Image (spheres, rainbow, N blue to C red):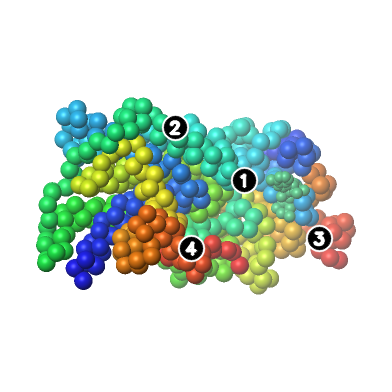
């Protein structure tokens, strides 16, 4: 078996006196799409923020075998992690193209222009709107831009926090179809946090279920789709 | 008519210097939605440094440039020492700190340079560029306005064409996503503080170089209020808004007060604030300010 790109062990997080994550373990292997399902308040966002160094935690977080728990967000980005935050992931007062340039902030190579073009190929609507302020885009377009912004850092691992939130089903489907293509073409490993279990499990290799700060179920995506408890809780069946 | 034209010229002259202090505030506000109340005092200190350097024999414009560097470095130090450790989203402690800095800098300047007004060297050619009947357009006015426009162009270029400028605007726009893009928030804001202080020092030097004014530690108190008003009027996050705001306030100060007999000269400050209130009632985010953009 190849060595994991991300390995999390006994991760605990608290906000003030309230413990939100009670020691969770999970692993992501290169080129996988892994999904973390969980209801509102389960701790999904907290998990992703822990990985990108946005909050203090205890336990172990290893990227490519190296402990990163005490690094700053900017150091973690430089180690190949990109994070599309929940909700507002764009820079509303910057143009679409400037958003993409900010995404490439950590880079000094000459290929930034090429990657911007790749983003425009992934999402042609962004090309049409490249000089427009990001704040004037529709919700779906903003999510495409947020994902593209994250990809501009050429991450090994892309974290996405509920990318389907608040978007129409058709748009979500397009978005997720692109995720699969990006995963294949750019070999970007993805860790996606979702409440939309059906769609997420459709594109994922494996999944975890987070309940009140603990992992309750884990397995291959096709097993989880057929799991009775998950069907009841997340698939409305 | 001549008197009116003369007043307009005066308005542009005063307005330009207010705009330079206002633009310094706009820079800080853009990044942090914080009004730095110490901005005027930092600028005054910078202008005193310029005067000191000049007294030591350094050529005038050399002194201005070194003074701008000095106040930029000082501001970067102040940011590091007093501002950075606080949560940028929690304004109250920060406001108190900038007020504290205001008092301390004012006191320090008074201890070093005393409260006696001193004359500031000429930055620009003296005399009038142009006289028509009784209207005099001095070189000072032309250069004050020109410097202001030039500073705005330079800042605009810096913010839109350089990487650090882009990072600065990204931080202003979305703190969390900036962090997640690998931007170091602290140093980026520090850059903003330095830039703002340098612009402020240029503004205060030009202000003090006005042939009819002298430099003294409390010289920026009035100018500060006019500048805050100018910044708010133009839209607190707009560079060019600062110029429009500055000119408007200059106009209110010299024209409106001149022509409306029941407003005495001492009331020009209040008149400026009244104009501000009227504008903000009509356009809450100022003339050129961005309204909050919300995701749909
Ligand atoms: N900054 C904070 N301060 C205090 N409590 C917080 C903070 N952020 C989150 N919490 C709490 O921690 C718990 C987990 O929050 P988290 O945002 O990780 O959940 P989530 O699974 O992402 O939920 P959602 O699906 O609603 O986004 C919740 O009970 C929430 O109220
Ligand atoms: Mg969440």
Res B155 seen here: no
Using the rendered image, report if marks 1 and 4 lie on a common chain: no
Quadrant in the picture for the N terminus of chain A: top right
Q: Position of residue A141 (x, y in %)?
A: 55, 67
Ranked by sequence position, the earlier of labels 3 and 1 is 1
Using the rendered image, report if marks 4 and 3 lie on a common chain: no
Q: Position of residue B118 (x, y in %)?
A: 24, 36
Asked if the beta carbon under badge 1 is closer than 8 A to the nearest atom of ligand 1, the reply is: no
Q: Are marks 1 and 4 in contact (CB under 8 Å)?
A: no
Using the rendered image, report if marks 3 and 1 lie on a common chain: yes
Asked if the beta carbon under badge 4 is closer than 8 A to the nearest atom of ligand 1, the reply is: no
Q: Which mark is residue B104?
A: 2
Res B109 seen here: yes
Q: Secondary structure at mark 1?
A: loop
Q: Secondary structure at mark 2?
A: helix
Please name the residue that numbered disc 4 is placed on.
B277
Q: Which mark is residue A234?
A: 3
Give the alpha-carbon distance from disc 3 to disc 2, as whole Å: 60 Å
Identify which residue, A22 or A80, lies in the foreground.
A22
Asked if the beta carbon under badge 3 is closer than 8 A to the nearest atom of ligand 1, the reply is: no
> Which residue: 54% across, 49% down?
B175
* Closer to viewer: mark 3 or mark 1: 3
Q: Secondary structure at mark 3?
A: helix
> Which residue: 41% across, 31% down?
B107
Q: Secondary structure at mark 4?
A: helix
Q: Position of residue A128 (x, y in %)?
A: 45, 71
> Which residue: 43% across, 41% down?
B38
Q: Residue under mark 4: which chain is it in?
A: B
Please name the residue that numbered disc 1 is placed on.
A30
Q: Are marks 2 and 1 in contact (CB under 8 Å)?
A: no
Give the alpha-carbon distance from disc 2 to disc 1, as whole Å: 56 Å
């Amino acid at each position: 078996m190849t060595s994991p790109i991300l390995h999390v062990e006994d991760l605990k997080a608290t906000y003030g006196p309230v413990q939100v994550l009670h020691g969770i373990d999970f692993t992501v292997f290169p080129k996988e799409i892994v999904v973390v399902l969980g209801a509102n308040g389960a701790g999904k966002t907290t998990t992703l923020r822990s990985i990108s160094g946005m909050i203090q935690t205890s336990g172990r977080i290893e990227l490519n075998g190296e402990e990163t728990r005490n690094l700053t967000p900017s150091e973690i980005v430089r180690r190949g992690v990109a994070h599309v935050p929940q909700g507002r992931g764009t820079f509303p007062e910057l143009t679409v193209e400037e958003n993409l340039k900010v995404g490439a902030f950590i880079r000094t190579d000459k290929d930034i222009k090429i990657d911007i073009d790749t983003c425009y190929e992934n999402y042609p609507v962004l090309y049409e709107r490249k000089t427009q302020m990001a704040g004037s885009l529709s919700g779906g377009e903003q999510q495409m831009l947020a994902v593209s912004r994250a990809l501009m850092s050429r991450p090994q691992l892309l974290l996405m926090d509920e990318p389907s939130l608040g978007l129409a089903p058709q748009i979500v489907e397009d978005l997720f179809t692109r995720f699969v293509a990006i995963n294949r073409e750019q070999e970007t490993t993805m860790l996606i946090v979702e409440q939309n279990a059906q769609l997420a499990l459709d594109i994922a290799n494996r999944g975890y279920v987070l309940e009140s700060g603990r992992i309750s179920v884990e397995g291959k995506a096709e097993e989880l789709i057929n799991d009775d408890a998950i069907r009841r809780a997340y698939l409305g069946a | 008519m001549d008197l009116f034209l003369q007043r307009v010229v005066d308005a542009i002259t005063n307005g330009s210097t207010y705009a330079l202090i206002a633009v310094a505030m706009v820079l800080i506000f853009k990044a942090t939605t914080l009004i730095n109340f110490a901005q005027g005092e930092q600028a005054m200190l910078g202008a005193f440094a310029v005067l000191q350097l000049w007294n030591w024999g350094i050529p005038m414009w050399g002194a201005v440039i070194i003074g701008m560097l000095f106040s930029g470095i000082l501001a970067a130090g102040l940011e590091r020492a007093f501002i950075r450790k606080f949560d940028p989203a929690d304004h109250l402690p920060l406001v108190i700190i900038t007020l504290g800095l205001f008092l301390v800098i004012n006191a320090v300047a008074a201890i070093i340079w005393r409260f006696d007004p001193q004359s500031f060297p000429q930055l620009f050619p003296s005399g009038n560029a142009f006289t028509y009947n009784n209207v005099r357009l001095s070189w000072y006015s032309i250069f004050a306005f020109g410097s202001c426009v030039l500073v705005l162009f330079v800042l605009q270029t810096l913010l839109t064409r350089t990487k650090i400028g882009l990072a600065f605007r990204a931080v202003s726009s979305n703190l969390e996503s900036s962090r997640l893009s690998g931007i170091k928030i602290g140093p980026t804001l520090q850059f903003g503080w330095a830039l703002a202080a340098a612009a402020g020092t240029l503004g205060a030097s030009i202000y003090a170089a006005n042939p009819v004014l002298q430099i003294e530690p409390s010289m920026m108190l009035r100018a500060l209020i006019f500048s805050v008003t100018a910044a708010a009027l133009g839209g607190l996050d707009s560079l060019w808004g600062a110029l429009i705001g500055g000119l408007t306030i200059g106009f209110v100060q010299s024209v409106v007060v001149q022509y409306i007999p029941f407003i005495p000269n001492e009331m020009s400050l209040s008149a400026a604030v009244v104009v501000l209130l009227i504008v903000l009632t009509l356009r809450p985010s100022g003339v050129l300010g961005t309204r909050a953009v919300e995701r749909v």
